[in-house]
């Protein structure tokens, strides 16, 4: 899995409450991603069996059912691992040029 | 909300167009899923202003067009994204480019027509670019240029008819969002540079 900024946000949104099923618009708001970025990501995660989806049962007459997404057990494990790796990578990012790293000057 | 049915119909039309790019076996399911979100966005209790909710709903629907070009199973890559990008703006391009182009042919000595044509070209270039790469620097440059060109067109109109207050009002309406946006863009870029492109909530 290649970790990108949008994927990191989506996984982060799922992991905020891994047991809660989330619908598309809810994830859009939580991950702050537009629909054109979110849905291809969800489709890919679903294809990799990291996310499972299910249709809700309409509560009222005439209400359109929404599709809910949830991380699978494997999805939770991989999401936690990948987010931890991404966080570790960020910690290793070198300091900007021109500014010496702490402790590097004698 | 007034005009809700028409807004939903427009949103559903955009979603249906987006789904046409998908393989037939997933098309109907995607349409059902995305169309079901439209009324929920339009009635989102967390967004206070109806106009903003309507804009969000239409933005959601329009952006599915970009998304379908990147869905698994569809043709991917730059050309597919470009095709999806020009899908909606083409009728708009027809209006904002063809009309001033026709006016230039009719009155080749009128400088304002050339300015309108330049605005139309910049606007269409921005529409296409913003759907291919929304966060790119070139997108921001094209958007800013289109706004400034629109402003120049309105000021040109005001110079020709100094008594017509509509031109002044429209010039202010066009320029004010840009003046508000530029400090925000500067702040956002600084914040991204500080956090390395990630928000604290993502960590």
Image (cartoon, coloured by chain):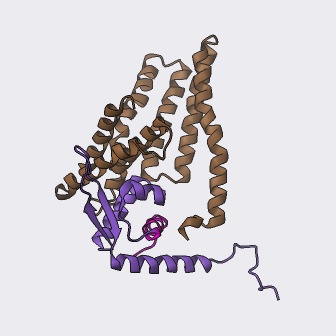
Chain colours: A purple, B brown
Q: Quadrant of the N terminus of chain B?
A: top left
The one of B77 and B60 positioned closer to us in this rendering: B60
Q: Quadrant of the C terminus of chain B?
A: bottom right
**Which stretch did the figure color magenta?**
A1-16
Asked whether, in this view, residue B74 is left or right of residue A17, the answer is left
Q: Position of residue A41 (x, y in %)?
A: 37, 64
The one of A68 and B144 positioned closer to us in this rendering: A68
Q: Position of residue B50 (x, y in %)?
A: 46, 36
Q: Is residue A7 magenta?
A: yes
- What is the count of numbered marks? 0
A60 over B100 or under it: above or below: below
Asked whether, in this view, residue B156 is left or right of residue B36, the answer is right
Q: Residue furthest bottom?
A: A106
The one of B162 and A64 positioned closer to us in this rendering: A64
Q: Residue furthest right?
A: A106
Residue drawn at (43%, 26%) of the image: B101
Q: Position of residue A31 (x, y in %)?
A: 47, 60
A79 over B172 or under it: above or below: below
B98 over A85 or under it: above or below: above
């Amino acid at each position: 899995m290649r970790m990108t900024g949008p994927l990191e946000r989506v996984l982060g949104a799922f992991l905020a409450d891994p047991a809660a099923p989330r619908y598309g618009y809810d994830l859009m708001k939580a991950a702050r991603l537009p629909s054109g970025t979110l849905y291809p990501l969800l489709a890919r995660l679903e294809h990799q069996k990291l996310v499972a989806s299910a249709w809700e049962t309409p509560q009222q007459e005439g209400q359109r059912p929404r599709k809910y997404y949830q991380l699978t057990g494997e999805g939770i494990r991989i999401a936690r691992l990948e987010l931890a790796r991404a966080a570790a990578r960020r910690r290793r990012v070198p300091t900007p040029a021109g500014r010496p790293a702490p402790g590097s000057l004698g | 909300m007034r005009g809700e049915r028409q807004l939903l119909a427009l949103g559903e039309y955009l979603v249906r167009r987006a789904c046409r790019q998908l393989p037939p076996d997933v098309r109907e399911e995607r349409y059902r899923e995305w169309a079901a979100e439209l009324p929920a966005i339009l009635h989102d209790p967390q967004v206070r202003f109806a106009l903003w909710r309507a804009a969000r709903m239409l933005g959601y629907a329009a952006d599915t067009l970009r998304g379908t070009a990147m869905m698994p199973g569809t043709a991917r890559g730059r050309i597919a994204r470009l095709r999806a990008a020009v899908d909606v703006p083409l009728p708009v391009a027809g209006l904002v480019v063809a009309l001033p182009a026709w006016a230039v042919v009719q009155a080749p000595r009128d400088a304002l027509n050339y300015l309108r044509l330049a605005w139309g070209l910049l606007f269409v270039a921005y529409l296409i670019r913003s759907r291919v790469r929304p966060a790119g620097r070139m997108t921001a440059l094209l958007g800013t240029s289109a706004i400034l060109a629109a402003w120049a067109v309105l000021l040109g109109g005001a110079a020709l008819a100094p008594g017509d207050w509509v031109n002044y009002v429209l010039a202010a309406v066009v320029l004010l969002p840009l003046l508000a946006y530029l400090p925000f863009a500067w702040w956002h870029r600084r914040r991204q540079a500080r956090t390395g492109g990630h928000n604290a909530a993502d960590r």
